[in-house]
Structure formats: C-alpha cells, structure tokens
Image (spheres, rainbow, N blue to C red):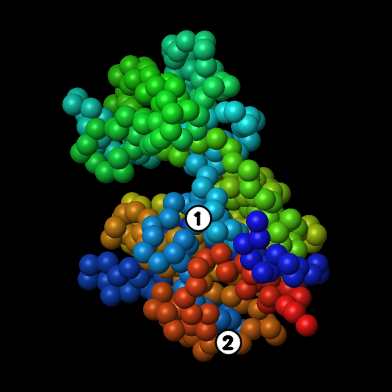
Amino acid sequence: MIEHTAELLGIKNERRIIFLVMDGLGDLPFGSRLSTPLEAARKPNIDALLPQSTTGLFDPVEPGITPGSGPGHLGLFGYDPRNHLIGRGVLEALGIDFPLQDDDVAARFNFCTLDSNRRITDRRAGRISDDENRRLVDKINEQLAMSNDVEVIVRSVSEHRGLVVLRGHTLGGRVSDTDPQTLGGRPLPAGALDAESRTTAEWLNRFVTEIERILHDETKANGVLLRGIDKRPPIPKIANRFPINPGAIATYPMYRGIARLVGMHVFDPPGDIPATMAAPKSVPKEYDYLFVHIKYTDKAGEDGDYDRKVSVIEEVDRHLPELMKAKPDVLVITGDHSTPAILKAHSWHPVPALVYSPGTVLPDGSKTFGERACQVGGLGRLPMRHLLPIALAHAQKLAKFGA
C-alpha cells in the first residue's frame, strides 16, 4: 500500500539526513512560567541554525489525538500510524534483541507499587534502577509457577520496564492493557478483544496474580501493569519505501525496537546525551539517514519536572556541534509527541520541528526555536508523516512528479 507520493519518486544520492528526536519535546507554559521549556531553554547552537532553516508544527497522528510512543515514531518515519497499530510489547522485545516468533504474544510491563488494598500508589515503582529490575526479574523467574501448556518468558528491559512473552500456537494477540494510567485505582483485568484472544487474557491475568504473590514482600515493586499486548505485525521496511539507507542511534530498548521493526540498522547503544550526540560522526557514510533519539526530555515531562526538561534541552544544545561533525546535509530537530510537564503525560498538542538545509531551504525568519515561533513557521501545521518526505525533498532525493 502506497501511503506517500514520495514512495514513487525516490532518487538515491549521498546527501545525509539526520533526525534529532528529543522525545516528548512539545510542552506548555507551567504555573508562573510563561514560556514552555523549549522556549525557556538557552539553545544558542540550535537557534544559530535558523537563518538556514524553516519551522512548523506537526501532529503525530491527527489534531486532538494523543499518541503513544509507537505511533509518534511511525509518523516520524513516514508511516501513517493509523494504518500500522503495533503493541509496545513487540517494540520492547525487538529493542532488547529478543527472538520474537510470529505466534508469540508480547507485553511490556511496568513494575508498580500497590498498597494493602491493591490500589496503585506509583505506576513506575519509583523508577527503580536497572540493577534492581534485574534482581526482581531473577526472583520472578526462580519462583514463577505456571503450567506447561504455554511457555511464559520474562525479561528485564530497563528501570521499571520489563517484558513478558507468551509462546503457544493457539494464542490471539488482541488483549486490553491492565494499566489504568492513573493512581488510586486497582490494576484492570486483561480483557480479550476477540474470541481468539480469550485464552491469552486468562494466561495474562494468572501471570499478574503470580507476580503479586512472588513480590508480596517487596516495598516498592510489588506488582506489575501490562501494556501494549500484541503479536508482531507485518510492516513494510522504510528502505523499500524511501531512497535511504537508514541507521538508528538510541539507548532505550523501545526506540531501538521500533527502528529495528521498520528495518533500520541499530547501532550499539551510546548511553548518555554527550555519547549519543557524538555517535553520528562515527557512522559510516553509506548510512544516509540517521535517527538519533534522546529520551530524557520525555522523562522530565512525565515527572512534571519543568526545570529538568529545560536542562536536558540545554545539554542537547551544548553537544550539537559534535552531532554536526557527522556533516548532515539536512538536519531535522523535533520530537515524537508532546509531554507537557504540567500534565505529566503525553498530550495531543502538535510538536515543533526545525528543518535545516543550507542551499535548499527558504528560511522563514524565525529567531528562536519554540512552540509559538513554529506556529507561524514556513512549514505550517501538518501531519507528522509528511516530515520525512519534506526532508527527502530538501536532500534532493525526490524526482519531479509528472511530466
């Protein structure tokens, strides 16, 4: 299925495109602060790009729709996320190089904190450390008592995140989440969304009960919330749709997973912001599209930490000169969705984007990169799936349409 005219017009060349994605970048003013974190941040290196840039706002799915991270990134990669629904469990599995089979059902889980009435007091168990996560997963694997009819595989991911995979030939993948996304309530039961998935839902509910039995003596992480339950879907590879040889630089497993799902070469995880920003300069030149992912803006937004989000943006800006050593012909700076600190969650607000392309861009006169400046930018407001074709055009990778 063709989703873009650009898929018919590809021209191979050596011009390099880099997408620098600050996860959850979009935001709102907060309390007495009249600026968003992006507007408040000191970012001289990003703003110095503006005389050779154009800007705009992009809706990850469509106006008014709050996206998950999967749909947000699919939009960035030029896919219509409404046509490609992917469970987060699949992305987490691919992100940690788990050998996911076609009949497997994967679910991402959060360790959470439950009170004595089984009410959720912390959906992320205090963002426990990776070491604590691994200890808990080892404890689960040592004590998990499920029957042999279906293989249950539990793996550590990072911090409060884990992966459970059900392996069996009669399992459907359409099951609802157990995470109510709010505090004070109890975990929801996993519910089958079609007849084929009833057995899967039963198994997952048994799994949740077993986890609470095993972790009953833990103070922080004594339960789990299941999210993104699904099987691996078929999806066309990005290099078969667009004239690029794509690579990904990302630390968090979920984002490595979605990059791998669409066929990107995923480089070794770089670690912190300085390492991530320096990594592109070492990538071989044949990779003419690089997806560079920064997670910490989103984490600050979800924690309601306005000042830390400002600090993360400023740190990215300080290290931008290192990324520029990779010599991008086109640099796109944007996010996958908005995560306003005042809401502590993803939101429906459009995401600011900057397209830097010396010699091929019509500058729109923006003086700073921020949400309100992008409202009047030269790109206007568009669905996110159009951002990659715009970058391809600036990289002269698209032929003329028609005679």
Is residue 93 shown above or below 203?
below
Q: Which residue is mark 2?
A: 363
In the image, taking residue 38 as reference, residue 397 lies left or right, namely right
Residue visible at 47% across and 75% down in the picture: 381
Point out the image quarter for the C terminus.
bottom right
In the image, taking residue 356 as reference, residue 241 lies left or right, namely right
Q: Amino acid at mark 1?
A: Arg
Taking the view exactly as shown, the residue that stands out farthest to the front is 195
Of 93 and 193, the residue lying toward us: 193
Of 13 and 400, the residue lying toward us: 400
Residue 121, quarter of the rendered image:
top left
Q: Which residue is mark 1?
A: 82
In the image, taking residue 282 as reference, residue 385 lies left or right, namely left
Is residue 208 shown above or below 369?
above
Is residue 199 shown above or below 27?
above
Point out the image quarter for the N terminus.
bottom right
Q: Amino acid at mark 2?
A: Pro
